[in-house]
Amino acid sequence: MKKMHNFNAGPSILPKEVIQQSAKSVLNFNKSGLSLLEISHRSKDFWKILEKSTHLVKLIMKLDDNYSVLFLQGGATLQFSMVPYNLMNQKAAYLNTGIWAKKAIKEAKLFGKVNVLFSGEHKGYNYITNKYVVPEEMDYFHCTSNNTIVGSQMKIFPNTCVPIVCDMSSDIFSRKLNFQNFSLIYASSQKNISSSGMTIVIIKHEILEKYKKNIPSYMDYKIHLKNHGIFNTPNVFSIYTSMLTCEWIIQQGGLEVLEKHNKYKSKLLYEEIDRNTFFENKINKENRSCMNVTFFLKEEKLKKEFDNMWKFENIVGLEGYRIFGGYRASMYNALPLESVHVLINVMKKFEEKFS
């Protein structure tokens, strides 16, 4: 099999060890004679997977028993509605830092008043300000930690008494944070966690004690918690793969080590973009994402030539989001440094060829 350099934004690259073990389990799980895809979600084998996955998530994030972990379906998109359905009594505060944050705001407006404290839309989402105050009367404050499409990332989170809800879909497990400052975290699984089709939701118990609402059963966090996360048939394969990924994270040295690797990978690529006369990044430097590096050709007429060059080197997934164009190098935990060097070398050769 030829070596591929996978810069896909999601579904995206996972550690080789995780893919190999998952593949074995699909054929014969735990020497049971059954495929992982066939085992019952009520079986002892699955309960062990669920309990271990939950334990490892909390261990990696240094969360105590005041938090619970749910492995749900519907992607982060469903959480855009579940969050206000469960937590909004009257009004909530949001940051509009990208396309997915904007979608979350749209859904929240169906449930109450949304106070948008900051919007970067008028400048193409090329920056994120820290100059906002979260009003104390808000039911919660919602933010998106990393904006996959445009390539920006929150480096500072507010110090507030208002419960913080964060969509960490594209940078969860990529850096060390004080996760106990958050009341609810959600993340779609197809980036740093597992395969697509699952969403991790991490909930601080006290945030649910404040609200008593009659809502549809599947949308109710309390019902999911009461049923130990298996109110309906869960995505067994994705939960198992997330368990393997968590084991891999711990083997690498945890979030501190991964954060150093991720910062180094992104630093190398940003330096090349800034140095190279044919490329540019449009995000304010202090807001640049370590996970999703976006860049654009200064001469669009050379797009075909550049595309041919990176594809020839077995690079995949470099195309930018369909609305914004350009290029996007998604560099999640499992992306090796070698792949970053291959891309940088292509950019250098491109500059040499057309200068």
Image (spheres, helix red, strand yellow):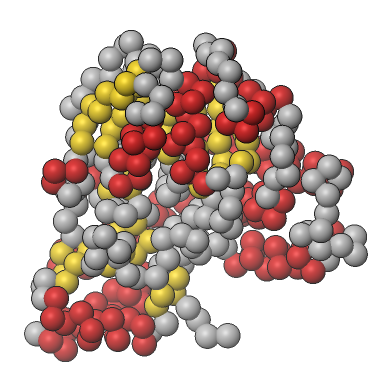
Q: List x then y, in percent, for residue 354.
A: 12, 86
Residue 269 seen in render = no
Residue found at x 64% / y 61%: 18
Task: Say whether residue 289 is left or right of residue 192.
Answer: left
Residue found at x 21% / y 24%: 132
Residue found at x 23% / y 67%: 326
Quadrant in which the N terminus appears? bottom right
Q: Please tell me whether residue 82 is drawn above or below residue 113 in the rendered image.
A: below
Q: List x then y, in percent, for residue 207.
A: 52, 18
Residue 129 seen in render = yes
Task: Say whether residue 105 is left or right of residue 205.
Answer: left
Task: Say whether residue 60 is left or right of residue 83.
Answer: right
**Viewer-proximal residue, 265 or 316?**
316
Quadrant in which the C terminus appears? bottom left
Task: Say whether residue 297 is left or right of residue 66.
Answer: left
Displayed quadrant of residue 267: bottom left
Q: How many marks?
A: 0
Q: Please tell me whether residue 308 is drawn above or below residue 124 in the rendered image.
A: below
Q: List x then y, in percent, for residue 175.
A: 43, 44
